[in-house]
Amino acid sequence: MAQAFVPVLLGSDMNVYGMARSFHEAYGLHSVAIGKGRLGATSNSRIVTVEVVEPRLEEDEVFCQTLIDFSKRYPEGTTLLLVPCGDNYVKLLARNQDALRDYYRFITIDETLLSQLGTKETFYALCEQHGFVFPKTATVTVNNYQTVELPFDFPVVVKPSNSVAYWNCYFPHKKKVFVAENREEFDAILAAIYGSTYQDHLIVQEYIPGDDSHMRVLNCYCDQQGKVRLLALGQPLLEEHSPEGIGSYAAIIPAEDLSLCRQMKTFLEDIGYKGFANFDLKYDSRDGQYKLFEMNPRQGRSSFFVTAMGYNLARYLAEDVIFNQPAECTVATGDVLWTVIPRHLIFEYVQSEELKDTVRRLVRQRKVCKSLWYKHDRNFNRWMYFHKNQASYYKKYARYFGNKGLRD
């Protein structure tokens, strides 16, 4: 039987699998994926198939031609819903949206707004206009990194302004985010980064005290009219701590803050945002305020926790873009533990006994969701992948927990 529409997901990682699972849970649909390579999260799956692998997919001409050619595999009149699941694909779609509108349905913002939101200096300036508080911040360039003086004390956080360019560079002991405890570490980190192909700006911020559980993640969906339809706030219990995973959430429970949600709704509607977005914030116990770190102009790999709460991400997207159904704004509430790691690691590395008690309760009540462990998508190969994936986290946490410096 023909599907009502076909989700075409860009990428092949856990974010792609989470979206495919959301489409399957909502509509029973099988998704297809197009990416630069094949990853374990979407391999041997009954709910998503990586149909095209194109290593040059990040080149605009190749991106457009690959997607246009792929659309011609389907009979005329088939509705293809295009969903970018990574920063690079979001940028490619925004740049090339006019060339693809005859072939796909999708939601995106224009390239100008995306550029404002995607560069941290301009993003913070925009946020400041809307009353958000963010950590004290300085910008470092390839021209001044050897002599720059910081207007705040150590420790400091060092991260790229251009995440796509940083993803494509390499240097020893590379991490998504660094924490420099002193000037010596700071100088070594900057020298390593600028010794690579990355030559764009770096963002340096004061370190906000508190463990991973002080973080918050706010997921949103804005419709084609620029109206917010969904706001879902989560409290991470742990982040990943491997070099490539720092800053990615490993376990989340729902949280509530109506004031923060109202403020974010006003911000998104004022700037005319459309599509998925998620925001990283950290609660600063020194002044009782949330400090806004960054915005991702897409759903993230941890965003499946929203579907796990009972607010299916695929349904919000399809009801807007495919079925043109109106909807009011919903602030999500729920009671679930979403995790990509074994719960034993949560009990070992989470510091708060109160949070561990919450996890115990949710485990007893069987309110636990793991994105990759889906009852409708189990076979021997996925069973093997899942258990190897889970076992690998024990080694990663033992080796890397708390290590955000320029060392292995």
Image (spheres, rainbow, N blue to C red):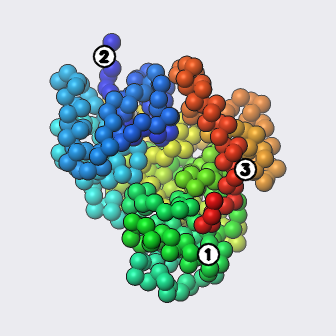
The numbered dot on residue 185 is 1
Residue at image point 69% right, 59% down = 402
N-term-proximal mark, 2 vs 1? 2
Question: Against 19, is 163 above or below?
Answer: below
Q: Is residue 152 above or below residue 113?
A: below
Q: Position of residue 141 (x, y in %)?
A: 42, 78
User: What residue is pinned by disc 3?
Assistant: 398
Q: Residues within 10 Å of mark 3 (few under 14, many from 20)?
A: few
Disc number placed over residue 76 in the picture, else none = none
Residue closer to the observer: 58 or 236 = 58
Reading the image, the residue beneath label 2 is 2
Q: Is residue 234 above or below residue 308?
A: below
Amino acid type indicated by mark 1: Glu
Kind of residue indicated by mark 3: Ala
Instruction: Work out how far the residue at label 3 is from the one at label 2, CA to CA, in angstroms.
Output: 48 Å
Marks 3 & 2, CB-CB < 8 Å contact: no
Q: Secondary structure at mark 2?
A: loop
Q: Decide: is 138 above or below 197.
A: below
Mark pair 1, 3: CA separation: 23 Å
Toward the viewer: 120 or 183?
183
Horizontal and vertical percent position of residue 67? 24, 38
Query: Secondary structure beneath disc 3?
Result: helix
Identify the residue shown where x is 73% and y is 43%.
345
Which residue reaches farthest top? 1
Q: Which residue is found at the position 78% from the left and 36% from the top? A: 361
Q: Quadrant of the C terminus?
A: bottom right
Q: Mark 3 or 2 closer to N-term?
A: 2
Q: Is residue 373 left or right of residue 276?
A: right
Q: Residues within 10 Å of mark 1 (few under 14, many from 20)?
A: some
From the top left corner, tell me how far across and down residue 206 is, in percent. 60, 74
Q: Are marks 1 and 3 in contact (CB under 8 Å)?
A: no
